[in-house]
Amino acid sequence: MRRKRKFYRGVVNHVYQKTVDGINLFYSRADYLVFFTILSVCAKSCGICIMMVCIMFDHFHMLARTESIRELSEFMQRFTSWFAKEFNLHSGRKGKIFKKNFGSAPKWDNKALRSAINYVGNNPVEKNLCRYAEEYRWGFLGFIGSSYPYSEPIDMRKAPLRLRKAVKEVDLMAAQNLPLNYAQIKRMFKDLNETETEQLTDYIISIYNPIMHNDIVSYYGSYEAMTDAMKNNTGSEFDINEKNDRLSHVPFVEMIKHLRKSRNEGDLAKIITLGMDEKMELAMELMKNTSATPAHIGKFLHMKIRRTENDNNLTLKSLPEVLAANREQGEDVKD
């Protein structure tokens, strides 16, 4: 039986949303930027106060304040369904990508809220994606007090025409409170070098950024005090009922890097629509060349690996037999 959602007007809520079957959704810079600009547009349209966001490969967290549970629910439904539509259209996938219900828990007092802030900020640290929370671009803490935390500021007087055109397009879309789509991002980044790519990424995030970072900093007194607190305390969230997934996310990064190098894949998300034979071949390749486990590969390729009682520890040697068995049954993998 589903628990009744707790909500109190004006109280900050820790909100989290998981993907269906724990599948991966973020394979490229474009995936993150499309998601973030849609979130931004919907937050502004719905009047939602966003205090923190952290995007992981298979889920995301937010701290948000709203006036009613209806506002929060409408916001979550609107922006997740909008991104799902864009992601499926881009990748060729069909069906839901997020679980039907999102999780949330009100943070009653400053102590509980600081613990939630530490918890959300340290998600990438716990998954071994960075050493400190502020180093992770998609946790957005680096943008507190800086518009270009991961690159040099764009000098429009010296910037090449291709970058100036991209900046103008971003400005135009943001001014109309419209998100960026995959086609736009592909076109804007197509001819940029590595330095320009990082600059434009920071610029897009800064222009669209709806996060009220000053609010979370105020609970610590300063940015330095906040980041120090995160380094000393990862935070705890016993009231959000989030199943603890102990998988490191480093193998996801390794698989993305491997495919970009070995296959020169531009749109990695499209691998999820490969046929079963191609997925089986790719699964073997990834297990040989990365530290990914079958559980990682199942999430990454949107496969369901159905294990047996005698096969609790899948290895490279046993993987082909398990995949073949699933193929004969016409099933994908469930981890």
Image (tube, rainbow, N blue to C red):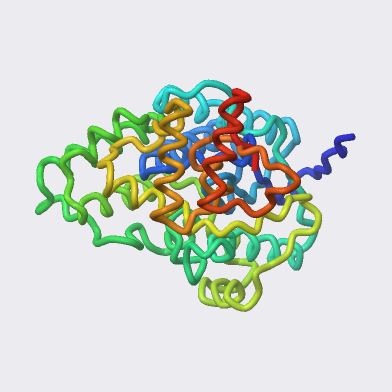
Q: Which residue corresponds to the image point at 41% horizontal and 31% vertical from the top-left?
A: 278
Q: Is residue 40 something that shows in the picture? A: yes
Q: Which residue corresponds to the image point at 37% horizontal and 38% vertical from the top-left?
A: 268
State whether residue 240 is above or below residue 25: below
Left or right, 207 with respect to 64, comes to left
Q: Position of residue 141 (x, y in %)?
A: 48, 61
Left or right, 178 with respect to 319, comes to left
Q: Which residue corresponds to the image point at 63% horizontal and 25% vertical from the top-left?
A: 329
Q: Which residue corresponds to the image point at 62% horizontal and 72% vertical from the top-left?
A: 220
Q: The C terminus lies in which quarter of the figure? A: top right
Q: The N terminus lies in which quarter of the figure? A: top right
Left or right, 172 with respect to 287, comes to left
State whether residue 302 is above or below residue 295: above
Q: Position of residue 162 (x, y in %)?
A: 14, 40
Q: Is residue 55 something that shows in the picture? A: no
Left or right, 238 with respect to 118, comes to right
Residue located farthest toward the right when viewing the structure as drawn: 1
50 vs 273, nearest the viewer: 273
Q: Position of residue 11 (x, y in %)?
A: 75, 50
Q: Position of residue 239 (x, y in %)?
A: 81, 54
Q: Quadrant of residue 281?
A: top left
